[in-house]
Amino acid sequence: MRKNLVAGLLVILMATPAFAAGKKRVAVLNFDYGTVMSSVQAIFGGNQDVGKGISDMLVEQLVNGGAYSVIERKAIDKIVAEQNFSNSDRADANTAAKIGRLLGVDAIIMGSITKFGRDDKKQNIGGAAIGGITGRFGLGGVGLRESKAVVSISARLVSVNTGEILVAATGDGQSKRSGKSLLGAGGSSGGAGGGNYDMSSSNFGDTILGEATKEAVASVATQLNGDAGKLPTAVVKINGLVADVSGNTLILNVGSKSGVQVGDHYGIYRKIRDIRDPATKKIIKSVVNKVGEVAITDVDETSCTGTYAGSGAPKVGDEVRN
């Protein structure tokens, strides 16, 4: 974590395995597609980040499944950029776990694409093998007989505490239809050129390659949703202070680096007195009263904003806890 915490920040971040109620927080990294890079270039007529495309499709499936609370991509991209993680770094389980700790999630989902292309066994054209015939393949698959599209992906659910792979899932997809073109009908590439094809669009989903991709992603999502109960929840303990009070709007000196997220609720407490050991004069206990609660509405790295509700008036310096 970077050394730009606000002076006086009182934060204790403790991640301990516990099966807590509620959804488990996860982040999905872009899938690695190095082994199918040549086939991707042949299919799309240039480089296309199919790893990001499949990651986005998986996020949608997990959100719809309801077993996880999935972190937004912009939060992941921000951490990756700040920490200067390379694509190879993100393929490492330990690095992925570090990203997860910075995001305050329970686990990271990472994966790779192992097949992405045409099933044509007679000509050995499938998955990464497509790259060997780039010159004859092209966007529309000119010169090839009709065949089906195939996609295979693998995913791993990684603990942010240990880097351990908790769940491994694989998904295979094959189009129900066959055709000469993976991305269109009659060998037409449509708008696939230039590496700007949107894999989340209905245009892609209607192609035979899109059909195979959706099937593979859906298979992995089903397995991950079914194994959500295996994931220990990281219980984040927040101890911070009220930094500013404006009506019922509070600014706290804890943020995303401490695990705070929009939608969280925390108690606001005020110290009444300290209890001291009569022999040593050391403080052995502090007596506090709960003033009210704050619902978090906005979060940055080192602070957050929330709406206050309670019987008492909050003050700068009041304690903030789970």
Image (cartoon, grey):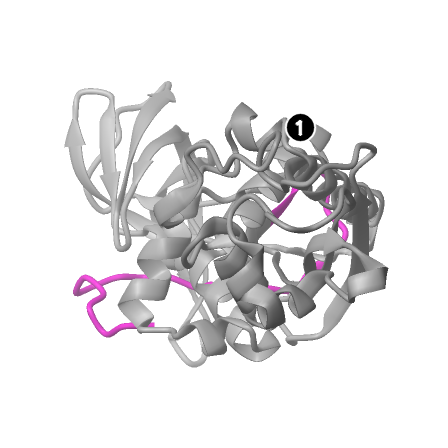
Image position, residue 106 (x, y; %): 61, 56
Residue occupying the point 51% across, 64% down: 135
Instruction: Label the magenta part by its dominant secondary structure.
Output: loop
| Residue kind at label 1, given as amino acid type | Asn
Image position, residue 123 (x, y; %): 78, 64
Question: In the picture provided, is 109 more to the left or to the right than 273?
Answer: right
Q: Is residue 248 above or below residue 200?
A: above
Does the magenta segment cover residue 96?
no
Q: Nearer the viewer, residue 257 or 248?
A: 257
Which residue extends farthest front?
143
Image position, residue 262 (x, y; %): 41, 35
Residue occupying the point 54% across, 52% down: 43
Q: Quadrant of residue 155?
A: bottom right
Q: Quadrant of residue 295?
A: top left
Does the magenta segment cover residue 19?
yes
Q: Is residue 24 visible?
A: yes
Residue occupying the point 45% across, 37% down: 198
Residue occupying the point 78% across, 38% down: 175
Q: Is residue 322 above or below residue 41?
A: above
Q: Nearer the viewer, residue 98 or 179?
A: 179
Q: Nearer the viewer, residue 207 or 71?
A: 207
Count of residue discs: 1
Q: Which residues are magenta?
A: 1-25
Q: Nearer the viewer, residue 184 or 150?
A: 184
Query: Dot 1: few (<14), some (14–19), or many (≥20) neighbours within 10 Å?
Result: few
Q: Is residue 32 visible?
A: no
Q: Is the N terminus in the top left, top right, bottom left or bottom right quadrant?
A: bottom left
- Residue receiving disc 1: 64
Image position, residue 209 (x, y; %): 66, 41
Q: Secondary structure at mark 1?
A: helix
